[in-house]
Amino acid sequence: MAKSILLRGGTALIHQEGDVVVAEKTDILIVGNNIEKIGKSLSADDAEVLDCTGKLISPGFVDTHHHLWQTQLKGRHANQMLLEYMPTGNVAVYAYQAEDVLIGQLAGMMELVDAGVTTVVDHSHSVYSPQHADAALTASIRSGMRSIFCYSTTFRVEDWTEDKFKLAEEILPPWFMEHFNKLAAGGPYADGRVQLGFGYDALFMPPEVNQKIFKSVRDAGSKLITLHWMRMPVVGQQSSVRLMDEQGLAGPDILISHGNQMDDEEAALVRKHGMSISSTPMTELQMGHGMPMAYDARVRACASLGVDCHSSGAGDMITQMRVGLQAERGRFNQNYVDKGENPWTCKQTVEDAFNLATIKGARACKMEGQIGSIAEGKLADLIIFDGQSPAMVCGAVKNPIASIVMHSSVKDVETVIVDGIIRKRDGKLLPVEGDGGAKLTWSDVARELDKSFQAVEGRASKLNYDMGLEALGAVFRLDWNKFPDI
């Protein structure tokens, strides 16, 4: 018999037509991994009952762009622009063994669960070998999270020392697609909780290669194809959107990470092909991408939010909602301030931000019928917030969405349910699966992570990052005059 959980007496945030969110005091019955019933005074004799009096029940957050293997890199990027990040972050997996990827990935996913993120699109550019890929996928399965594991191309470093930096000549080595097809044939994983996607940052390849790859991964059943693109000096002025349109690659399964500085024609192509955008406010605002696109009228209907690099900033969606909203308000208001005027009210709302992290994230994943909102028949991916915490008290009654977007923190995430299973209870992460079915507490994971961090740092200490930066600049054909010394 499927396990049942009854959430009793909470205030649930229910999406209605037009993405209007209403707060309803109600019970929610979970049977197995589904929301079975929503209503008042529900009963279920065999259910575990959670008293949700004074609590808010939210859809689980959906993070549509994240590099989860990077946990060991925390502390490196706080003052870095994208150019500096390339050798110290993007290609830093050179210093990782497969076991480092596993523990880094697992820790990154547990950080998300702790913050109420129940679904993630993992752009896994840690695929240095089949073993690295398997380690990342294993961690995804063990974490208990819902994941679209996007097996991704990466710039692999072949040799890197104090006096040498050499990139591998092939971005698509012979084993790469062979192993992807093997993983695709074995998926989905964890009873459908972990699905396979594909990450592709190699559109510079000849059109016939791109077309062959896209057809292959689609034929294999890839849930999404995700790629980085924005217009800026680090990555150039080329248009991945136009290129995908011209080469017949574009489609509704495309998820573009960032998309900053796109022009009107590109925005029209995004809409035409039903593509989606993932904005990552923390990294985009820091690293010189330009303003996030999440509120841009041309593409906001297909926008969502992601964390990107938890190595450079907060690994939670509350921060992304808040930073993205306030940045857009600042940009919008400045247009009036410059004229000596002041808008009568805020144009961008907390509900807009909340939807970006819930139902619009689900749409970007092509899973809006399963996740992203609280409804009967949907998967049971839910967050229970402590509405009486010091941060949320009063606000949770007056304006529940505002209390989450503007006042809450990870501390206020009391319980997290993913696929009908409680993964965080009473403010504490529950154990995850380890080797041989062993259970690992967060303390166990943290200890192993520290060992891995020390090992990665030891290997990294022998690498010449300046040489790496120079070599990557040559590969990307950077115009160094566009990087002023400030």
Image: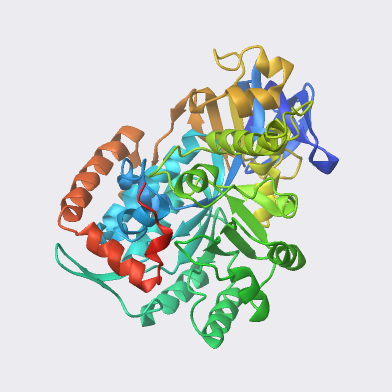
In this rendering, the answer to whether 359 lies above or below 382 is below
* The residue positioned farthest toward the bottom in the image shown: 208
Residue 421 visible, this angle: no
Q: Nearer the viewer, residue 464 or 4?
A: 464
Tell me residue 423's x, y (percent).
Answer: 49, 36
Q: Residue at x 66, y 32 (%)?
A: 58
Q: Position of residue 370 (x, y in %)?
A: 69, 49
Q: Which image quarter: residue 159?
A: bottom left
Residue toward you, 334 or 215: 334
Question: Could you tell me which residue is drawn at 66 percent across and 12 percent down?
Answer: 394
Note whether 36 is above or below 210 in the view shown: above
Image coordinates of residue 428 in percent, x first then y, are 44, 27
Question: Looking at the image, which is closer to me, 170 or 204?
Answer: 204
Q: Position of residue 280 (x, y in %)?
A: 54, 47
Residue drawn at point x = 54 percent, y = 67 percent: 237
Vertical position of residue 205 compared to residue 360: above or below: below
Coloration mode: rainbow
From this viewpoint, which residue is outermost toward the front? Answer: 339
Q: How many marks?
A: 0
